[in-house]
Image (cartoon, grey):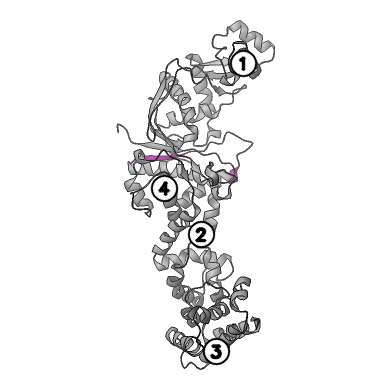
Amino acid sequence: MSSPVRTRFCPSPTGTVHVGVMRAALFNWAYAKHTGGQFVFRIEDTDEARNTEESYRHLLDSLRWLGLEWDEGPEVGGPHGPYRQSERGEVYRDVLAKLVEAGHAYESFSTPEEVAARRVAAGQDPKQGYDGADRETTEAQKAAFRAEGRQPVLRLRMPDTDLSWDDLVRGEVTFAAGAVPDFVLARAGGQPLYTLVNPVDDALMGITDVLRGEDLLSSTPRQLALYTALTDVGLADGAPRFGHLPLVMGEGNKKLSKRDPTSNLDLYRERGFLPEGLVNYLALLGWAIAEDRDVFSPAEMVAAFDVRRVSPNAARFDLKKAEAINATHLRALPVEEFVARVTPYLADAGLVEPTPTPEQQRVLDTIAPLAQERMVVLSEAVGLLGFLFRDQPEYDEAAVAKQLTGPDAVEVLDAATAALTALPEWTTGTIEAALKQALVEELGRKPRQAFGPVRVAISGRTVSPPLYESMELLGREASLARLAAAREVAVP
């Protein structure tokens, strides 16, 4: 490429952070990093009614959590600031003045009703939109309109030629001449619109490549026309390359709505997805590192990312697949890293101190390799490991109904208590041998029937880390106390 790649991410700080928006950020980031270019982050916050400072801060935090650090933008700086559109009003006013002076933009006084009436009178569909009638409005007519109290919008004069580009994702795309009407750059009163500010910012910030959702493809001819005008007045050096990413779909093959809970990035963060696990899954929504490989690190993605291999086909967000990808990353963590990441979830639940006590740390370090293999997200540690940090387990009602009901359960608990009370030493191996002897060989129970009541007595759940190791960690006194408590709960 003739110049270093410069991509950008320019979201609006409104409400929750959509996973599809973060997928777009990820692809722009990976493309820039793969090519040794720059990733620019700026904020589209000109809609004062919807934008909030809280959402702005949340956007920054979300990008950083995912590891998508930007080279230029808020809190980082750079040579093309400011990076918030709300702080660039003077820039847009100057650009509009240059476009009007050069004849690329013009004042338009027609109301929507007048445009529709003219279309109908000409036998045309009013849905065709603006008809270009104000292109040649005389100064006298403009004065008359102003005398009536009308304020004009500013429109860009679209070229009378086809508009084409080689889309990085979709190949050659062409819009026929006349297919896109002259569009509004600024409202009556001069407030610039998205149709102006984003291309202007891209031009002034030297953006070379724009990767964005395919739902914006229809606006690309307008951007190309504006770039031609900006180049003519010396504010741009041609148009960037465009690539339109596939939509992210939800249930029912519909676009994943912001109202759909699964679209909210916070859901995955709160559940304890690893950022590298979620990045891996988001990358799969339109791209693959290889046909036979789904799991990779962010660094591996950067090394392999080829924007021309992004699929144009819609991608469906599959929560089960996302969980499976995350589980693989979680299990690959070094044990000490797993402990460090899981500790905040246990601390938030009041199970351990924010800085665990020596005894809590001992239990965590011991159980971590066993728990790690049974978890999908970090928050599961609260339910899975909570019994190790409480005086008594919290019984799951379904587990009690299934395993602590009936004479067989009582018999198993009594036999387990008797066998364990007599143990000379309390180790994983002796606990396992004693329980198998008493419950499987002497009572004749199948393993599932034999150990189910004991597991619920110890952990409160039907699913837990390995039973014998857990009992060794709890110790003889605590384990026997839990068997006795479960004996009181059990229904003969």
Residue underneath mark 4 = 283
Which stretch did the figure color magenta? 35-54
Q: Do the residues labelled 3 and 1 touch (CB within 8 Å)?
A: no
Q: Is residue 110 visible?
A: no
The amino acid sitting under disc 4 is: Ala
Residue underneath mark 2 = 272
Q: Is residue 362 magenta?
A: no
**Alpha carbon distance from label 2 to label 1:** 54 Å
| Front of the two marks 3 and 2 | 3
Horizontal and vertical percent position of residue 244: 43, 35
Q: Which residue of the protein is positioned furthest toward the left in this rendering? A: 2
Horizontal and vertical percent position of residue 459: 55, 76
Going from the N terminus, do you reach mark 2 or mark 4 first? 2
The amino acid sitting under disc 3 is: Ala
Q: In which quarter of the image is residue 6?
A: top left
| Front of the two marks 2 and 1 | 1
Q: Can residue 478 be seen in this view?
A: yes
